[in-house]
Image: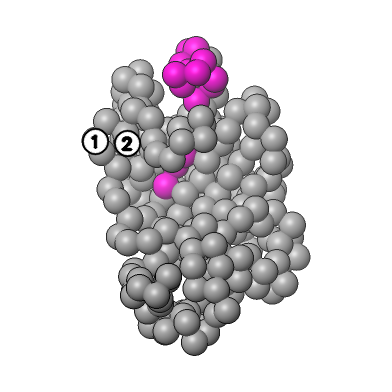
Amino acid sequence: MTGTYIIGKRVRFDAARTLGGVDASDSLTAEIVLKARELTGTGFVCDFGDLDGLREHIDAVLDHRDLDAVLPDASDKGIAGYLHRWGSGHLPAGVRARLSEVRILTGRAPTPAAPEAVGFRARHWLRGLPDGHKCARQHGHAYLVTVPDRSGAPGLLPVPRELRAYVVSAFHQQVLNDVVSVNPTSELLAAHLAEWAADRALTDPSGRPLAVRVSETESTWAEFEPGASA
C-alpha cells in the first residue's frame, strides 16, 4: 500500500509568557512532526533518539523561562517557527530533510476518549540497529492505537469495532516479532493496521481509507496515511 509515514515526538516544558497584554503562562508541548514516503532500512522515519538535540535545546532555552525575555514572539506560532528553524539548522542532515513542522500544544495533553483509542501491551525488539541500541533488546510497551481525522478537523475518529477486535486479539500480550513479518517499529505497525483496515473496506466518514496512529509512549507516535503525499 502506498502512503505517507508520519511520526511525532512531544517535548513538554513549562514557561511564563504574555500574550496581548495578558499573562499566558502555561504548560506547553512542542510536537515535532516528520514525514517520509520511504523508511530507513530499520523501518523508521527517523530514530526518535535523533531528535534528542531538539529536546535538549528546549530544556536549555525554553523550559522554566520567561519566554518574553527569550523570544521575539512568544505566541504558539512564534515558538513553533523558532523551533522549526533551529531544527532545520541543527538536527542531523537526514532528519532535517524529513522535518515537516513543529506544533505547539498548550495545557495538559488530553487522554483520548474510550471509543477513540484501543490499547494493548506487548513486547518486541528491533533488527538492524547499531550495537548497543536499547531497542535491539527485547522490551515491552503499553501501546495505544488511534484513528486520526483526515478531514482537516482536529481530533480522532472512533476506532471501528472490527479494527479494535483485531488489535486486541492479534497483538495484546504477544511478541510482535512473531505476529507481523516486518520489523515491528511503530511506523510499520501503523502501516500494517492501515492495510488491514483497507483490505476490509473500513473507511472514514468521507469514504477514504483510514489513517492509523500507533503510540509506544505518551510522547511518541507514528502514523500511516494511505495514498497521502509527503
User: From where the camera sits, is residue 52 visible?
Assistant: no
- The CA span between labels 2 and 1 is 6 Å
The percent coordinates of residue 135 (x first, y second) are 50, 58
Verify CB contact (< 8 Å) between mark 2 and mark 1.
yes
The residue type indicated by label 1 comes to Ala
Q: Is residue 213 above or below residue 72?
A: above
Where is the C terminus found, in terms of image quarters?
Answer: top right
Query: What residue is shown at x 57% (from left), y 54% (from top)?
Result: 33
The percent coordinates of residue 146 (x first, y second) are 39, 36
Q: Is residue 168 above or below residue 21?
A: above
Query: Which residue lies under the disc numbered 1?
Result: 114
Q: Is residue 76 above or below residue 43?
A: below
Q: Which structural element holds mark 2?
A: loop
Our reading of the magenta stretch's main secondary structure is loop
Q: Which residues are magenta?
A: 200-215
The percent coordinates of residue 144 (x first, y second) are 35, 42
Query: Which residue lies under the disc numbered 2?
Result: 117
Q: Which is nearer the eye, 7 or 180?
A: 7
Q: Quadrant of residue 112?
A: top left
